Amino acid sequence: MILDRFRLDGQAALVTGGDRGLGQAIAIALAEAGADVAVAAHTGDLAATLAAIAATGRRGVALRADLADVRHAGDLVAAASRALGAVDILVNNAGIIRRAPAIEVTAIDWNAVIDVNLNAVWALSQAAAQQMAVRGHGKIINIASLLSFQGGIRVPAYTAAKHAVAGLTKALANELAGRGINVNAIAPGYMATDNTQALRADPERSRQIMERIPAGRWGQPDDLAGAAVFLASPASDYVHGHLLVVDGGWMAR
Ligand code: NAP
């Protein structure tokens, strides 16, 4: 039955940035679909996510890692595997944004964004894929962005990293599809989280953004739940290297 192919029973997931925002919603959605979920954060409080996972009857595990240092990526995958027995599903969600005019961006901010939004995605994907390849199955879901397609304003490092995540998604998909591993991405539109707080607080930018969203509203974290479960589940077994846009229609304009 088709709905059974969306179930994640017996699967173990690792979601980075799972304490708040999009990662929290994705972690809870995966648990609702039947997966046990290791949720990682840097400093954030994971209690609310763990409580929501527990309410689904699935197992939740809290992990900590500073993904600004890619050397922690392998340890994080290993910790999730130890806790849950494997990592069948990796969601590379943790990310940061630094806004400044391009001519004022500091090297520190540039490197911080590239480290968390790109280098950690690469290192986590490689570590997870090494295990998945041995088992012959796995799902890697990268959280990309509309700025995987467009240039954006005052966020050059973020745009560079998210374009690179799109390329990395396709490059890994090409190599790993034959090993039973699906690598895909979700490109969220403008979602109401801490990441976009500054935009929503700016009446002019907020108005400009809203005018271009056919759905007529900002996205909510839960709007990604269906896409995440789909890409994590057997229902997407023949989907490789795809960037699934969930944006209220922004890219269609
Ligand atoms: P958010 O609310 O700001 O949450 C960011 C998450 O990343 C937090 O869980 C945070 O953990 C984690 N994180 C940040 N730095 C980290 C580090 N050094 N080590 C480990 N974890 C770290 O952001 P969001 O809006 O949910 O965004 C999640 C993802 O979606 C990001 O990749 C973002 O680029 C992408 N995205 C967001 C939007 C949007 O409109 N919101 C649109 C497109 C794409 P702590 O709480 O522990 O710091």
Image (tube, rainbow, N blue to C red):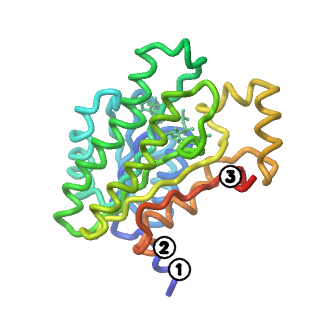
Residue receiving disc 2: 6
Which residue occupies 34% across, 54% down?
171
Instruction: Indicate which label's residue lies in the foreground, 3 or 2.
Output: 3
Residue 13 visible in the picture: yes
Q: Nearer the viewer, residue 200 or 169?
A: 169
Q: Indicate if the residue with disc 1 has its beta carbon within 8 Å of ligand 1.
A: no
Return the x and y of residue 167 as percentages of the image width and height: 41, 49
| In the rendered image, the vertical position of residue 60 relative to residue 67, given as above or below | below
Residue 123's quadrant in the figure? top left
Residue receiving disc 1: 3
Query: Could you say whether the residue bearing mark 1 is in a helix, strand or loop?
Result: helix
The residue type indicated by label 3 comes to Met
Which residue occupies 36% across, 50% down?
14
Left/right of residue 245 with respect to residue 131 in the rendered view: right
Label at residue 251: 3
Give the alpha-carbon distance from disc 2 to disc 1, as whole Å.
5 Å
Q: Pointers 2 and 1 in contact (CB under 8 A)?
A: yes
Which residue occupies 74% across, 25% down?
201
Does label 3 or label 2 sit earlier along the sequence? 2
Return the x and y of residue 208 as percentages of the image width and height: 80, 35
Query: Could you say whether the residue bearing mark 3 is in a helix, strand or loop?
Result: helix
The residue type indicated by label 2 comes to Phe
Q: Pointers 3 and 1 in contact (CB under 8 A)?
A: no
Return the x and y of residue 189 as percentages of the image width and height: 64, 46
Instruction: Indicate which label's residue lies in the foreground, 3 or 1.
Output: 3
Query: Could you say whether the residue bearing mark 2 is in a helix, strand or loop?
Result: helix
Left/right of residue 128 with respect to residue 104 in the rendered view: left
Residue 140's quadrant in the figure? bottom left
The residue type indicated by label 1 comes to Leu
Does label 3 or label 1 sit earlier along the sequence? 1
**Label 3: how many residues lie within 10 Å, few (<14), some (14-19) or many (20+)?**
some
